[in-house]
Amino acid sequence: MKFKVVEQHHSIKLQAHGRNLEEAFANIALALSALMVKKIEDSKEKNIAVGAQDLKGLLYIFLEEILFLAETEEFFVSNIQNLTIKKGKGYTLHAILFGDTKKESYEFLQQVKAITYNEMEIQEERGKAMVQVVVEI
């Protein structure tokens, strides 16, 4: 299972798994996109780079970037490749996002208003990782 969605009152908890943090971060971003739009084509590509002092901050900023692209450019993510997380003085994340801009043929599901730190978790063990975040709808 790549991700799980748990609905609450005005928020939804997303939980994603992967073999490592990079895969779990990519899967949580795909879960966020799946909340907003159904079946997006891979017709456009965007390179992104974000940074933060810690992993929770990195997850927050990464998902905020996905949400920002959806709100400002109406770009919705359908696939993520080459996602890397590097630790230096803080953490940096680079990724290639594939997706498409809003089209009338797409089925829009929910508007996500905000990413929160509420119940945010990041766990990494040998050979598996899990990330969890709550989003406001």
Image: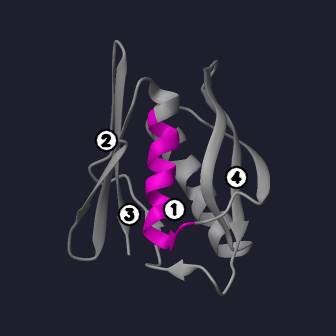
Label 1 neighbour load within 10 Å: few <14, some 14-19, many 20+: many
Q: Quadrant of residue 85?
A: top right
Dominant SS of magenta comes to helix
Question: Quick check: is 101 in the magenta stretch?
Answer: no
Which residue is tagged 2?
Answer: 1
**Is disc 1 in contact with disc 4, using a CB cutoff of under 8 Å?**
no
In the image, which is nearer the foreground, mark 2 or mark 3?
2
Residue drawn at x 30%, y 65% is 12
Distance of mark 2 from mark 3, alpha carbons?
Answer: 20 Å
Distance of mark 2 from mark 1, alpha carbons?
Answer: 16 Å
Residue drawn at x 63%, y 84% is 105
First along the sequence among labels 3 and 4? 4
Vertical arrangement, residue 9 with respect to residue 124, above or below:
below
Distance of mark 3 from mark 4, alpha carbons?
Answer: 22 Å
**Is disc 2 in contact with disc 3, using a CB cutoff of under 8 Å?**
no
Which residue is tagged 1?
Answer: 33
Of 123 and 105, which appears nearest the observer? Answer: 105
Q: Quadrant of residue 129?
A: top left
Distance of mark 1 from mark 4, alpha carbons?
Answer: 11 Å
| Amino acid at the residue labelled 2 | Met
Give residue 64's position: percent from left, percent from top. Answer: 56, 57
Bounds of the magenta segment: 24-39
Which residue is tagged 3?
Answer: 135
First along the sequence among labels 2 and 3? 2
Residue 56 vs residue 43: left or right?
A: left
Give residue 98's position: percent from left, percent from top. Answer: 70, 52
Give residue 69's position: percent from left, percent from top. Answer: 68, 64
Numbered mark located on residue 98 in the image: 4
Label 2 neighbour load within 10 Å: few <14, some 14-19, many 20+: few
**Is disc 2 in contact with disc 1, using a CB cutoff of under 8 Å?**
no
